[in-house]
Image (cartoon, rainbow, N blue to C red):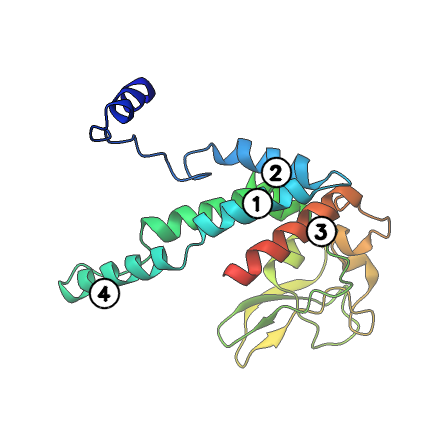
Amino acid sequence: MAAAAAAAAAVGGPQPPQAEMPAPGLALDKAATAAHLKAALSRPDNRAGAEELQALLERVLNAERPLAAAADGEEAAAAGGGGGAGPAEEEALEWCKCLLAGGGGYDEFCAAVRAYDPAALCGLVWTANFVAYRCRTCGISPCMSLCAECFHQGDHTGHDFNMFRSQAGGACDCGDSNVMRESGYTNQRKKTTENSFVGRDHKAYRNCINNCMLPLM
């Protein structure tokens, strides 16, 4: 193709059509690209990696593509086909998940973030008809309530507890020493050792991802 173009230029003839290059970044393997960017952004001088990330995100989170997909969704809904996220939004979401996870599994990334959460209290708030638990063995207050996740992650074997449906809403008291004994806390809230998930290199990478991604969303 290059030789043909040169020959055409030499005789002043018409230029042959050039092969269209794929959109940068979008044709790449997501996990490999995210891992590469994580390594580049974790270096002391990460300017080149930041430029690569910015260019990729500008393609992935192009505002015109979601708008076009939304218009298609409206047309489909008008025709009785329903709306919903189109291929552009789904592709952008997959890219964001992969970039956040640094090329690893997104579910593993979410689990690591939850493990790093230093919050002493759960504090999950629920509305009416939410199914919760109450352990009278661990409770100091008779109104102590636990969400299902905290209850099952705590050790309540042989305890006097019951499952109930909340009538007017409430909040999970796991971690609140004024309401329940520490023996009923989840293992996560009993831990006091520092979690090593966010090391210095991880912080640099997450900061770059946040600074570049959030303004485009």
Residue position marked by numbered label 3 in the rendering: 157
Question: Real-space Cα distance between discs 4 and 2?
Answer: 36 Å
* Residue 39 locus on image (x, y percent): 67, 35
Residue at image coords 32%, 48%: 87
> Is 29 left or right of 141, judged from the image as shown?
left
* Quadrant containing the N terminus in the rendered view: top left
**Residue 51 quadrant:** top right
Q: Residue furthest front?
A: 11
Q: Is residue 104 visible?
A: no
Q: How far is disc 2 from disc 3 in space, using C-alphas?
A: 46 Å
- The residue indicated by pointer 4 is 74
Q: Find residue 139 and report its horizontal and vertical position in percent.
A: 76, 69
The disc, 4 or 3, on the residue closer to the chain's N-terminal end is 4
Q: Which mark is residue 37?
A: 2
Residue 88, numbered circle: none
Q: Amino acid at mark 4?
A: Glu
In percent of width and height, residue 23 lies at 39, 40
The furthest residue to the left: 79
* Kind of residue sitting beneath label 3: Thr
Whichever of labels 2 and 3 marks the residue nearer the N terminus, that label is 2
Instruction: Estimate the spatial distance between the alpha carbons at disc 4 and disc 3, rounded to whole Å.
Output: 53 Å
What residue is at 78 percent from the left and 63 percent from the top? 120
**Observer able to see residue 198:** yes
Residue for badge 1 = 53
Query: Contact (CB < 8 A) between labels 4 and 2?
Result: no
Q: Mark 3 or mark 1, which is nearer to you?
A: 1
Q: Identify the secondary structure beneath mark 2.
A: helix
Q: Is residue 46 above or below residue 129?
A: above
Mark pair 2, 1: CA separation: 7 Å
Tag 2–tag 1 contact (CB < 8 Å)? yes
Q: Amino acid at mark 2?
A: Leu
